[in-house]
Amino acid sequence: MDILTKRHVSCFLGNHLVHLFSGMLLLSLLLFFPDNTQAQRVALKTNLTDWMTASPNLSVEFAVSNRLTLDLSGTATPFKYKPDFYFRHIRLQPELRYWLVSLLTKHYVGITAFYSTYDVGYKERGYFGDSYAAGLTYGYNWILSRRWNFELNAGVGAIRYRLARYRPGTAHPAPDESGWIVAPVKLGISFVYVLK
């Protein structure tokens, strides 16, 4: 698994970010809409915890059975605040959820995975690399109105990372550190708009 170069990340975060989100949405629609869509539930979401880190994000959730939904989310931060202060990343995260009461209502448990590439710099320290993870999640969804819900969720799991340390303003070296850690893999405070 080759790490994305800084040039690839910049290109990807540029014009292709819109294509990423629209492509993910289109693929999801094609894969998870059966011919009979009468009982199908679809929701669009945005996670406020990601927005707190200046990370635009979008998530779409589809019902795949009476109790199961598939949530597909993507987030990216293309911003560089100063030459020696930046936090740029791309994260794609699917999650399979089992709803204990009914779809998009009250408690759920789930399994999730993600892939992320990142470039973080602050003053004299820079970190560049990628990571992937798998873990378990729990969440609760409150119905606010016919179309709007509010959701809290959290998850923990195992994360595999590769990392290169460098000084901001210099070239990125090849990753020379890697390892596994147990850490949070999901944290969400989301507004949910139920499409149908």
Image (tube, rainbow, N blue to C red):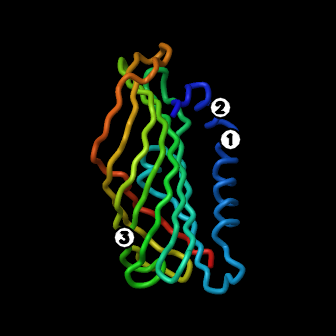
Q: Is residue 123 left or right of residue 114?
A: left
Q: Is residue 153 left or right of residue 63?
A: left
Residue that label 1 marks? 16
Residue 24's place in the image compared with 90, above or below, is below
Please, what secondary structure does the residue beneath circle 3 have?
strand
The residue drawn where x is 40% and y is 16% is 167
Amino acid type, residue under disc 1 in the picture: His
Select label 3 or label 1 by which is in front. Answer: 3
Sooner in the amino-acid sequence: mark 3 or mark 2: 2
Please, what secondary structure does the residue beneath circle 2 have?
helix
Give coordinates of residue 88: x percent, y percent.
49, 35
Q: State the quadrant of the C terminus.
A: bottom right
Figure quadrant of residue 188: bottom left
| Mark seen at residue 67 | none
| Mark seen at residue 109 | 3
Cβ–Cβ under 8 Å for marks 2 and 1? yes
